Amino acid sequence: MTPDDVVARIDPDEVVQLALALGNIDSPTGSEGAAGQFVHDWLAGNGFRPRKFALTEDRFNVAAWLDGSGGGYSLIFNSHLDTTLRPDAVWSARDPLDRLYHSAWVEGDEIFGDGVVNDKGPMAAFLVAAKAIRDAGYPLKGDLIVSAVAGEISREPVDEWQGPGYLSKDLGARFMVTHGAVADFALVAEGTGFGIVGIEPGKAHFKVTVVTDTPRYYSPYLPRPTGLSDSPNAIVRAAAVIEAMERWAYDYQQRNTYRSEVGTIVPKANVNAIRAGYPFNLTSAPQVCAFYVDTRILPGANPLDVRDEIRGVLREVGVEGTVELFLYRPGFEAKGAERLIETIRRSHDQVFDEPPMIVADPVTSMWRDTNAFNELGIPALSYAPRSRSHATTKSFKVKDLTDAALVYARIAMDLCNQDREPYTPLGAHLNRDIAASVMAPVKG
C-alpha cells in the first residue's frame, strides 16, 4: 500500500457532493448546530468515532481520530462550520437573503456558495481524504484528527447583546483544543489559494461614545449654523470624529505593516457599526452617539496603545467622549512550524505543477483559527483553495476543491509517518541547570 494507492481511492464526485451538502445547510455564526450534527453523522456513518465538544449545547465542535501506532507526529485538520451572513442581518447587507450566502451549487467548472468557500469546501476535502486513508488501512504512526468547529467568524458580546449566541472563538477551536483535541501541528483549511500562511493579526474592538455638552434640543430650536465638532447633535459630532478616524486608520495601517517570511500583515481599522437616537422618536437631537471600531493588531501589540491613539483622535477633533476596549484577541506568528511547512510544500509539488503561490496581503491580514492553535502552543498554518473574489463571486474551481483532497491526504500520510523527535520538558532543562548550580563548587 502506497500513498498513490490511497489517493487513487479519493472520488472527486464524493468531495463535491459532500461540499454541496454542507454548503446547503445554512449555518450562520450562532446557528451551527445542524451543520455540526451533519458532520458528526457523516463521520459516524463512515466508520469514525466522532466526539462533540460543546460549551453550549446547540453550538458544538466535532472531531474524530485516526489513531496512529505511535512514534509519529500528530496532525489536526481544522475548518469552521459557521458562515458569514445571517438571514436577519438587514443592517449589514443590501440583500441578506442572497442565495450566495445560504446555499451552494455547481455551475460549469465552478462551485459556488459562501459556505463552501468559507469554509465547508476545504472541510469536505480533508474529510474525504481522511476517509480514504482509513478505508485503505494505510498505517500511520502519528494520530490524524479531523475537526469542524463553531464560532470562527466574529460575533462578540457587547452592550445588551450578550450570552451564548454572541460567542465565537471561545467556544470554537480554542474550546475544542483545551478539551482534548491536541496535536503536534494544525493545518487550518482556510482559503489561501494554496499558499502557505503562518501569521495572522490579532484584533481589538472599541466602542467610541461621543456626547454633547448642550441641551437635548427639540428640532425647531436646534441652533444653526455650527461646525461638525461643536454641533449639539451627537450624531453630527460623531461624523467629525469618524472623518478623523478614517485619516488615522490609513496612517495606522501604514505605520504598522509587518512583513515576515510567512506572510505580510497590513492591519486595518474600520468603523463598522453606529447607533444613536430612536427612529420612532425623531423630534429631538440625541446627546449620545456610539460607533464601534474593528482594529487589527500585530502579534505582540498592546491593544491599550491603540485605545490611546483613538483617544488622541477625539482630542484632535475637540470632541468629548470615551473609548472602551470590549474585545481583545492576540495574533500570532507560527513558531516551530518548519516541519509542517516543508511537508505541505513537498505534498503540494506532488499534486500541482507550480509551487505554493505568494499569498495576497489581505489574506494574511485577517483573523483565522490558526491564532487559537498557535496561542495554545500548537504550530498552525493555513492552506486551502480560495475563491476568485472572496468579496463578491464566492466560488472556486471544482478541480481546486478535488485537488485539495489529494494534497491533504498526502500531507497527512507524510507528516504522520515522520519519526517524532523526543520531547524534553522545559522543566527538565531548568532542573538540570538548578542542580548544576547547586552542585558547583564554591569559589573563594
Image (cartoon, rainbow, N blue to C red):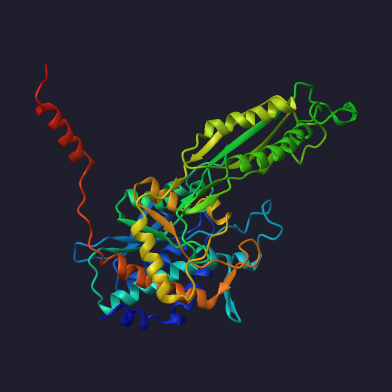
Can the viewer see residue 147 in this picture? no
Residue 23 lies, with reference to residue 107, above or below; the image says above
Dividing the picture into quarters, in which one does residue 275 lie?
top right
Q: Position of residue 82 (x, y in %)?
A: 50, 59
* Image quadrant containing the C terminus: top left
Where residue 413 appears, x then y in whole percent? 30, 70
Residue at 47% from the left image edge and 54% from the top image edge: 262
The answer to whether residue 87 is above or below residue 138 is above
The residue under the point 41% across, 49% down is 372
Name the quadrant containing residue 136: bottom left
Depth check: give the residue in front, 283 or 59. 59
The picture quadrant where one finds residue 213 is top right
Q: Position of residue 401 (x, y in %)?
A: 49, 73
Query: Residue 253, relative to residue 52: is it above or below?
Result: above
Q: Quadrant of the N terminus?
A: bottom left
Q: Is residue 168 above or below residue 138?
A: above
Q: Residue at x 55, y 31 (%)?
A: 305
At which x and y percent is residue 2? 28, 80
